[in-house]
Image: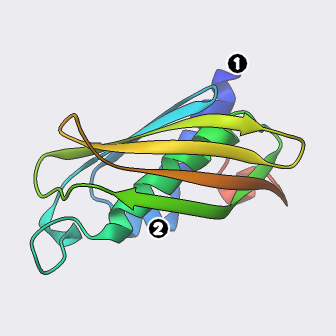
Amino acid sequence: MNIEHFRKLEKMYLNANIQKMLFETTAISISEGSSEITLDIHKKYFHALNAIHGCIYFKLLDDSAYFAANSIVEDYFLLTTNFTTQLTRPASKGSLKAVGKVRFISKNLWIAESTIYNNGKEIGFGTGHFAKSKIQLTEEIGYF
């Protein structure tokens, strides 16, 4: 288990431009084969019916599964090649927590799943396939 690798991935996530643009308050915790991302709900994430838009669910599910997978790959950036999302309940207040876990590893494929919770109640889940890119994990891409 490489704790330094986990902290560098966390910084890379929090400092990404998309994070700064989308999320006001978010936190991530990565460990071997798993990750947790939390987000406080704000009205700016709502669709017309005053609940969280599906893109927010998707991003949290994909990100938590992705970082669970990349936690065990220490040299290259992974890419999401496929992600399936199932949304089961709406959320409009409190906080969201997405929990990702690696389910399968082969030479060229990592499969991870994620479950998203609103104030402790499951509201959706997803499964993703991830492949190693040709981009090394370096300071230039925010891995420091």
- Residue 84 rendering spot, x and y as whole percentages: 53, 61
The mark lying in front, picked from 1 and 2, is: 1
**Secondary structure found at label 1:** loop
- Residue 62 rendering spot, x and y as whole percentages: 51, 55
Q: CA distance from mark 1 to mark 2?
A: 28 Å
- Residue 48 rendering spot, x and y as whole percentages: 13, 81
Q: Amino acid at mark 1?
A: Met
Which residue: 18% across, 71% down? 46
Q: Earlier in the sequence, mark 1 or mark 2?
A: 1
Which residue: 68% across, 54% down? 129
Q: Farthest residue to the top: give it.
A: 1
- Residue 99 rendering spot, x and y as whole percentages: 43, 37
* Left or right, 51 with reference to 4: left
Question: From what the image shows, is residue 141 above or below residue 69?
Answer: below
Can residue 22 be spotted in the picture? Answer: no
Question: From what the image shows, is residue 135 above or below residue 103?
Answer: below
| Residue 1, disc | 1
Q: Amino acid at mark 2?
A: Ile
| Residue 18, disc | 2
Which residue: 73% across, 33% down? 72
Q: Farthest residue to the bottom: give it.
A: 48
Which residue: 45% across, 52% down? 61
Q: Quadrant of the C terminus?
A: top right
> Crowding near pointer 1: few (<14 within 10 Å), some, many (20+)?
few
* Left or right, 73 with reference to 107: left
| Residue 121, disc | none
**Secondary structure found at label 2:** helix
